[in-house]
Amino acid sequence: MPALSVNNIVKRYDKFTAVDRISFNIDEGSMFGLLGPNGAGKSTTMRMIMNIIRPDEGQIDLFGQPFTEASKNTIGYLPEERGLYQKMKILDVLQFLGEMKGLSGTEAKDRSLKWLDRFDMGDRAERKVEELSKGLQQNIQFISTVLHKPRLLIVDEPFSGLDPVNSQFLKDTLLQLRKEGTTIILSTHLMDQAERLCDNICLINGGKIVVSGELAAIKRDHSSNSVVLEFNGDGGFISGLPHVTGVDNYGNYMEVHLHNDVHPKDLFKELANSELEMRRFEATETSLNEIFINLVGGPRK
């Protein structure tokens, strides 16, 4: 039985169809990437999963059952737009939000203190939310989302605005929650994070599914003959080499796309005779970011 089953859902606003016949299943205890550009229909889909809005057509089952009022406390939701009571003390706001999710006052306080210690914020429990930096406020928002131990956790752009240290800690926390059996839906624009964390993905655009399924299979089906280069020097000439079909140039880092019948060693021989100082030469599979760009295309008009 999947943790979540989304079957042929549709949502219309007047003549505009925001979500058009989307279906996917999510296995319990997995991390699922719900991906797409701005305006793709991700937020509308998540709101229907949480029963904030209802689909015009289709069915959503949570842990094998249609959504009920009791289902709300099995879900934790971290929205992209954060919002906390700025004038309240951190422990008070966490305890309040925990009680809103069905915890007793004592249980909410005990869990809040444990999570604050886990985030190395135990000494800030009596400070007001407004005294924290934006990144630390995001940590508090995350704690409030998982305080009641949801079976399904939905996180929308969870890494937005976090510094590298807090991003790493949040990533480790999500992986630990998955290990403990929590089912996680990750909605993000950061394809590298989705590629490293997700078991399965659903990429949507214009309210429709572009590609969906196991991430490894999607990458295999959309792979291209590519090489990653890191170097010192001017690599501008690489795009004009006969074996090359295109490059993604980042300065001293480059993803080079080759003709299908070309072996990477042929490119290596050409570069070995150049004046470039090579630091890295790696034949690699197509990144999820490149697949995203290829399937979705350019900016929406």
Image (cartoon, helix red, strand yellow):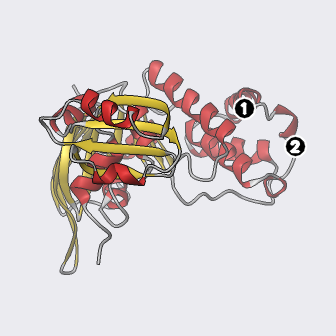
Q: Judge depth for marks 2 and 1 and give the one in front.
A: 1
In the image, taking residue 117 as reference, residue 58 lies left or right, namely left
- Residue on which the image places disc 1: 119
Could you tell me which quadrant the C terminus lies in?
A: bottom left
118 w.r.t. 160: above or below:
above
Q: Position of residue 47 (x, y in %)?
A: 37, 56
In the image, taking residue 219 as reference, residue 252 lies left or right, namely right
Q: Residue at x 35, y 27 (%)?
A: 30
Q: Position of residue 275 (x, y in %)?
A: 47, 41
219 w.r.t. 7: above or below:
above
Q: Work out how far the residue at label 2 is from the one at label 1, CA to CA, in angstroms.
A: 15 Å
Q: Between residue 232 and residue 76, name the one nearer to us.
A: 232
Could you tell me which quadrant the N terminus lies in?
A: top left
Q: Position of residue 181 (x, y in %)?
A: 42, 21
Q: Residue at x 35, y 60 (%)?
A: 37
Q: Residues within 10 Å of mark 1 (few under 14, many from 20)?
A: some
Tally of marks: 2
Q: Between residue 227 and residue 179, name the one nearer to us.
A: 227
Q: Is residue 86 visible?
A: yes
Classify mark 2: helix, strand or loop: loop
Q: Residue furthest top?
A: 180
Q: Is residue 183 visible?
A: no
Q: Are marks 2 and 1 in contact (CB under 8 Å)?
A: no
Q: Amino acid at mark 1?
A: Phe
- Residue on which the image places disc 2: 126
